[in-house]
Amino acid sequence: MIDGKLYIQMFSLHGLLRGENLELGRDADTGGQIQYVVELARNLATDDRIGRVDLFTRLIADRTVSADYSNPIEVVSDRFRIVRVQCGGRKYTRKELLWDHLDEYIDKTIKFIKREDAVPDLVHGHYADAGYVALRLSEFFGVPFVFTGHSLGRSKFTKLLEEGMREGDIVKKYRIDRRIEVEEEVLQNADLVVASTGQEVDRQYGPYSGGRLPPFAVIPPGVDLEKFYPYHHALMPGHQRDEREILAHVSVLGELNRFFLNPDKPLVLALCRPDKRKNINGLIKAYGEDLELQAMANLAVFAGIRKDIVEMEENERSVLTEMLLMLDKYDLYGKMAIPKKHDFDFEVPELYKIAAAKGGVFVNAALTEPFGLTLIEASASGLPIVATDDGGPRDIIKNCENGLFVDAMNSREIAAAIRKIVSDNELWKRFSANGIINVREHYSWPAHVKTYLEKVGGLCADASSTDFSAEHGDTAAGRRLAAIDYFVITDIDHTLIGDDNSRLGELMNLLAKNRERIGFGVATGRTVDSALAHLEKYSVRAPDVIISSVGSEIYYGRDLIYDRGWNAHISEKWERARIVDLLSRLDFLEMQDESTQRKFKISYFMKDPDERLPVIHELLTRNRCAYNLIYSQGRHLDILPARASKGKAIRYISYKWEVPLDNMLVAGDSGNDEEMLRGDLLGVVVGNYSRELERLKGLRNIYFATAACAGGIIEGIGRYRFIEKSKGEIV
């Protein structure tokens, strides 16, 4: 909560996102979704029930785009911020290349949440990539998760196949397999899915999860009626126009007029990204093959923002090149305009008003259209519409009664519909008036916000408190970890639990008494299941963190939330199968039981380390394997990724949850504990330690206790005055 009111975090990761002057149509990733998310956040922030809305996107510091996108926090209004988090480098890149970096984004967002000292009441992910991020944060912090797909992978995959693209090429270019996998998981776990139309629910979401889908709320997007207002308002007495509106009007009119021989004719307007699915060339074909329509009206196609077609992505480049070829084919010079750019905030609203004032028509001839924000913008301006008989346009025309459906594949039908509206003055007036009136009834942002908060309010009421207090044992893992700044992390076997467990209960009571400030974790060579079973056997409470399988896995809380960020981090250059194959040549290695083997851990039995370890190192190094080798207890050999170990896992936790290393006390007894004991941490070697750790004597911040097992840990806690430090009694 923020000041006792809802705190909502929204996520929209790809594209170019800022509070003003959106670059809509710049590329495939900066389309209507961007506009919708910004407007939703902006309008939610005006409601008195909202404490704050933070819209998270990607931080981009790239000379090819505006410096606006490198600003970490953009304050849009007193209750609306855009928060930019860097992942996958600083360059602007398309969404398909971001998948491998989303766990990095999650980790950095967790750090942001902890620094802000505020957990959201609700997370809302837009599109599959942001859905993945929001789902993971929902798991960590125990808050409701809302999802909006905007477009979904299964539908896109089908369309691309129908267009003749090969399956292998689709997977390679669009990472469609990864996207669909994530969408399935997201839809299985979402508390609510917000869609724009009923058809979107059936057609887009229907093929997922075997029909077992989460609750849906169909809430049509709104339109900014302060910006998109009727074209004739400018003629009304007393109407005050912003100077920027006037300048935009003059600019747009001048840009259009330079293309047309007869600029006074009605204007057929299209505004969309240069994407094949938008069927721009179907519209040009309809206009080019209908001489009567050419005589009646001009055509203007605003197909995104461009500088040089050659430098654009393949899809956009192909569409724009074909547009120019078709202009030439049908000899549409003087009748057709293809401007290179437009400003969304002021020029686009003026475009609609200019087209309406000329008695024109707005056309959306997309092959498929989940909603169509431009249709309601045009309608609000008093511009009649012609739209594809699909998805959102069906609902819009049904509700607004301001246009005609067409078969997007039938160019003659498209041309006939445009001609009918342009040539019939009474029909044009009726459609224009209906659009103005009915958009305000069905597609206003206040109505959208009202319904949205009604739907999510119940979810937030059912969720646990968003207070950071760590007093209660059932606190969500993320909430608890965000609330504490001190940790005791210990090995299990022969350290926490061993031959002498006489003081184990005392240690557990000490940690329980100080639980509000100090977290408890274990770092073990055991698997997570084996570790939990062993702890339960000795009545040790469930840890806040389990570092298992010699540091190759991390789990949090009672729900054992798996740290996918750590997984992504250590997977770099890990070739498990290849290492197993290479080591199979060494007859002195005995593979351990299958139950001990993990995705990021290969375990053997081996004796005589002094002679044999150099052989293993030589073999793996010669074959350029990236690995970490850990030998312990005179017989256990573990091969891990180069980035994995118990020590590295502890340092990762320190980074992710912003717990300073010198606020972390770690305890161990054997060689596989050595790395985690070194450095800036507070190390404790229990009295019953293995000879492997003798070399650590005399090092800074490593205390050798005299007592064994839990007693040694208690001794170390006292030696470092760790309890007093956590209370702020010493510096």
Image (spheres, grey):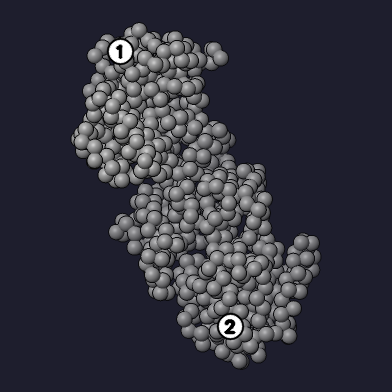
Residue 517 location, x and y as percent? 46, 21
Q: Mark 1, mark 2: which one is toward the viewer?
A: 1
**Please, what secondary structure does the residue beneath circle 2 have?**
helix
Q: Is residue 367 above or below residue 508?
A: below
Q: Residue at x 46, y 29 (%)?
A: 651
Disc 2: CA contacts within 10 A as few (<14), some (14-19) or many (>=20): some
Amino acid identity at mark 2: Met
| Quarter occupied by the C terminus | top right
Q: Residue at x 59, y 81 (%)?
A: 325
Residue that extends furthest to the top in the rendered view of this protein: 706
Q: Residue at x 49, y 76 (%)?
A: 388
Comparing 389 with 572, the one in front is 572
The quarter of the picture where residue 503 lies is top left
Disc 1: CA contacts within 10 A as few (<14), some (14-19) or many (>=20): many
Residue under pointer 2: 326
Q: Residue at x 38, y 29 (%)?
A: 646
Q: Is residue 321 above or below residue 502?
A: below
Comparing 385 with 650, the one in front is 650
Residue under pointer 1: 688
Amino acid identity at mark 1: Asn
Residue that extends furthest to the bottom in the rendered view of this protein: 292
Q: Is residue 673 visible?
A: yes
Of the two numbered discs 1 and 2 on the same chain, state the one appearing first in sequence: 2
